[in-house]
Amino acid sequence: MTIRQIIYPFATAILTGLAVSSCINDVPEKEDNGQPKFVSLTLSAAPLAPLTRATAIFPEHQATSNELIQNWFVAIVDDSGTVVALDQGTQSGVWNDVVNVELELYKTYTAFGFANFNKTNSTADSCEAFASSLGLSKIGDKINIEDINNALYSANGDKDFLSSEESIPMTGYLKFTPKGTVNETFAIEVVRLYSRVEFAFVKQTTDNISITEIGLQPINAGSVFLMPKYEEKPIPDNKYPDVTPTLPDGVYYKPITVGIQNSDVPLDKETTDISERHRFYIKESIAEGNHPTDHFHIGITLKRGDQTEEIATYALADDDLKFFYRNDYVLFPIVISDYRPMLNVYDYPPIGGYPVQVENKGTEFYATFSSSGAFDIDARLIDSTGKELTVDDTPGADKTYYVQCDYDKEIYKGLNLTYDSTTRRWNGYFEMGAENKVNEPIVITFTFNIDNLKYTRTLYLRSK
């Protein structure tokens, strides 16, 4: 299995704007009587820009109905914080709708837009009810605009993620001043509160493969800010945005598990999108500081024939994948092959001592030592039958593979891992109780490279 990540700003699948445009052809430059004027506004979800990172094998999937406008509510307040106009509508997954309001010209307003709020994704049963909880329920209501800009959102029942069928809530705001000129337009971008995470599975084996679970961590299980911070959004074609999402205080992280049904993976012909796709939606999340590795990890549970396999990876080992933003489209192509990395650890205990005990949990290996001393690590690739691959170091050979070993040499200075090309093992020294300052296991990462695939396994060394 290889993990490659492609981060798409969610432009083709997001609501790129509540575009507000005058439909009045002959509006004077200024109204002398100061009376409100009826204005028809366009609610638009046209894409900002096309995405270009899709490939022939893993093309971008277009927005689905639950990612478009299904219902909406718009509240417009003046500079004093008084609600002066309201409108709402119901659709079935559209890019555009119309907002009808009456506004005085030459006054400054802030428009707040809400879409797709319901009982499954919020504490309210409609967009109107959600807006009402913020004080935007009827004309004449008085609110503090900054309170809404700083409001928090948490899914109904603290749901950690939304399924592929659930409507994705969206919010947006715009400060504007209508002047009544011909073809006057304003645009308020409504941004999804979630990122779409999509897995594309293909197989390079004739075994029957089906996916039963997807795991991902660390994922924000707390709150996010309700309104978007437009300046932090990734722009199209920016694969690795460098602005960290701003999250409120008190955010907490946890692993999530997404159950999958009826997911037979087709054989990869490398000519078209024959992958088995699965998607779900998560809130903004940051890996750094929220996982011991400062990376996101994925875990896959699959069935190979009648046998269940748990595959986890140190994944997304690309250091540039640091964040999930609201409105992101993050695609993970996963290739399943016949290759399986295995790690064995051998030590040389004193007479009467116990040999190191190695436990395999998916692709995490735990080696428990009962005494200090020298040890060897044997890292090999085997096929689905358990047969070890024959390594041919000749360039271009069919089964050439190599293994990379990585650990923090500053923290684990006494480990002294070296590679012996004769035995093809890593030799080191383990000192009891000296894992690190907080007495946590020593973490060693092995990356197996073969046929343009990468497999990553994590080995934890610990004391009994």
Image: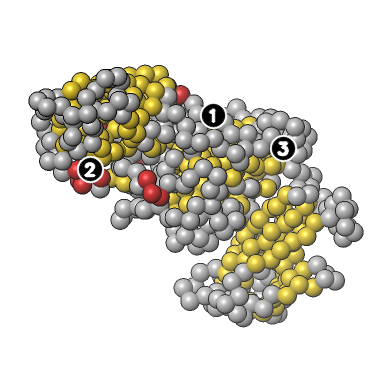
* Circle 3: element type: strand
Instruction: Give the amino acid at mark 3.
Output: Lys
Disc 1: which residue: 62
Name the spot of residue 55 as percent of width and height, x first: 66, 37
Dot 2 alpha-carbon crowd within 10 angstroms: few under 14, some 14 to 19, many 20 or more = some
3D distance between C-alphas at marks 3 and 2: 48 Å
Which residue position holds label 3?
A: 203
Residue type at tag 2: Ile
Q: Out of 20 and 180, give the one closest to the viewer.
A: 180
State the mark number for residue 148.
Answer: 2
The kind of secondary structure element at disc 2 is: helix
The Cα–Cα distance between marks 1 and 2, rounded to whole angstroms, is: 31 Å
Position in image of residue 186 (x %, y %): 32, 33
Q: Is residue 162 left or right of residue 378?
A: left
Residue at image position (77%, 68%) is 425
Whichever of callouts 1 and 2 sits on the residue coming sooner in the sequence is 1
- Which quadrant, please, contains the C terminus? bottom right
Image height of 41 relative to 240, above or below? above
